[in-house]
């Protein structure tokens, strides 16, 4: 068979030469548009489940978070290995699937089982899925610099401007921020003053949490336009209790428009 093929090729040298030239040109054109990975991703299809459990020891995280998650994900279809890692205040569960499993199919299956086990986890545990990419895809790093900007200003620019712009770029799975100072607000309590005023730490926490809440009311139609009423929870509750005593058609007193002191 091979001898006949060689003999046929020798008799038709021009045809073989044209075919070789055509393959050479087609390969060169394809090479210019074919995506090539500098570091091929040979890792398995895996889904990472991260749980944040603040203030808990590794043994507590292992018993209350990692173990229930690992035993639940073992029954996910096409799962090959499930690994768990417990650390202080955090837990990582790696769900590795069989070869050929679609990544987004695997993530949807993990989400289904995670929603079923969510009610059995502690109230303070916050669980979420990791990015849909492996560590092999970490190929680009950059630094945000600027004269006259403090580290907290640079971190704010990265977190609220640059990061969102980069996440909209096709092919970018996650933008991780490192360094700088994250802007935060802290309330320092003086135990002696709390004792003097008869206030507990829980009351201060509830007051700070309640001060950040806004409430919405109904809409009021005036001259063909709708006006939405909104305000803080304290002002809205007191304003409703005062205006609810007014009879229909009676105007409210002038001081009712001011904020209660």
Image (cartoon, rainbow, N blue to C red):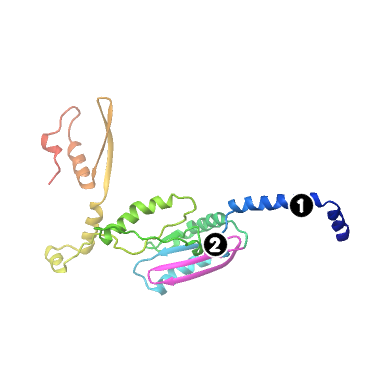
Q: Nearer the viewer, residue 247 or 214?
A: 214
Residue 23 in the image: state x and y as whole percent.
71, 52
Residue 31 in the image: state x and y as whole percent.
61, 54
Residue 187 in the image: state x and y as whole percent.
21, 62
**Tag 2's secondary structure?**
loop
Q: How far separated are the C-alphas under marks 2 and 1?
A: 34 Å
Can residue 183 be seen in the rendering of this structure?
no
Q: Which residues are magenta?
A: 72-98
Q: Which mark is residue 17?
A: 1
Q: Quadrant of residue 89?
A: bottom left
Residue located farthest toward the front when viewing the structure as drawn: 14
Instruction: Give yes or no for residue 91 being in the magenta stretch.
Output: yes
Q: Quadrant of residue 140?
A: bottom left
Q: Nearer the viewer, residue 42 or 33?
A: 33
What residue is drawn where x is 69% and y is 53%? 24
Q: Which mark is residue 201?
A: none
Label 1 neighbour load within 10 Å: few <14, some 14-19, many 20+:
few
What residue is drawn where x is 13% and y is 66%? 193
How many numbered marks appear? 2
What residue is drawn where x is 60% and y is 58%? 101
Image-based side of 244 in relation to 136, left or right: left
Magenta region's main secondary structure?
Answer: strand
Residue 79 in the image: state x and y as whole percent.
59, 63
**Tag 1's secondary structure?**
helix
Q: Point out the frontmost of discs 2 and 1.
A: 1
Q: Which mark is residue 38?
A: 2
What residue is drawn where x is 45% and y is 50%? 169
Instruction: Give yes or no for residue 16 being in the magenta stretch.
Output: no
């Amino acid at each position: 068979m091979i001898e006949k093929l060689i003999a046929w090729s020798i008799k038709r040298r021009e045809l073989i030469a044209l075919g070789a030239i055509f393959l050479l040109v087609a390969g060169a054109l394809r090479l210019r548009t074919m995506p090539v990975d500098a570091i091929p991703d040979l890792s398995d299809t895996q889904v990472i489940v991260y749980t944040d459990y603040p203030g808990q020891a590794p043994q507590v995280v292992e018993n209350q978070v990692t173990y229930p998650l690992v035993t639940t994900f073992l029954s996910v279809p096409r799962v090959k290995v499930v690994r768990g890692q417990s650390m202080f205040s955090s837990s990582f569960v790696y769900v590795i699937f069989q070869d050929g499993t679609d990544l987004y199919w695997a993530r949807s299956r993990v989400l289904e089982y995670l929603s079923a086990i969510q009610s059995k986890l502690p109230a303070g545990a916050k669980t979420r899925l990791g990015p849909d990419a492996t560590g092999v895809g970490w190929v680009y790093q950059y630094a945000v610099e600027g004269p006259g900007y403090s580290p907290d200003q640079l971190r704010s620019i990265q977190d609220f401007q640059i990061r969102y712009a980069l996440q909209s770029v096709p092919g970018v799975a996650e933008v991780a921020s490192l360094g700088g100072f994250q802007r935060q607000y802290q309330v320092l309590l003086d135990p002696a003053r709390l004792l003097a005023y008869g206030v507990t730490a829980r009351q201060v926490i509830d007051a700070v949490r309640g001060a950040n809440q806004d409430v919405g009311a109904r809409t009021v139609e005036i001259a063909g336009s709708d006006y939405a009423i909104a305000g803080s929870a304290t002002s809205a509750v007191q304003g409703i209790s005062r205006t609810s005593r007014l009879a229909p058609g009676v105007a409210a007193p002038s001081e009712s428009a001011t904020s209660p002191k």
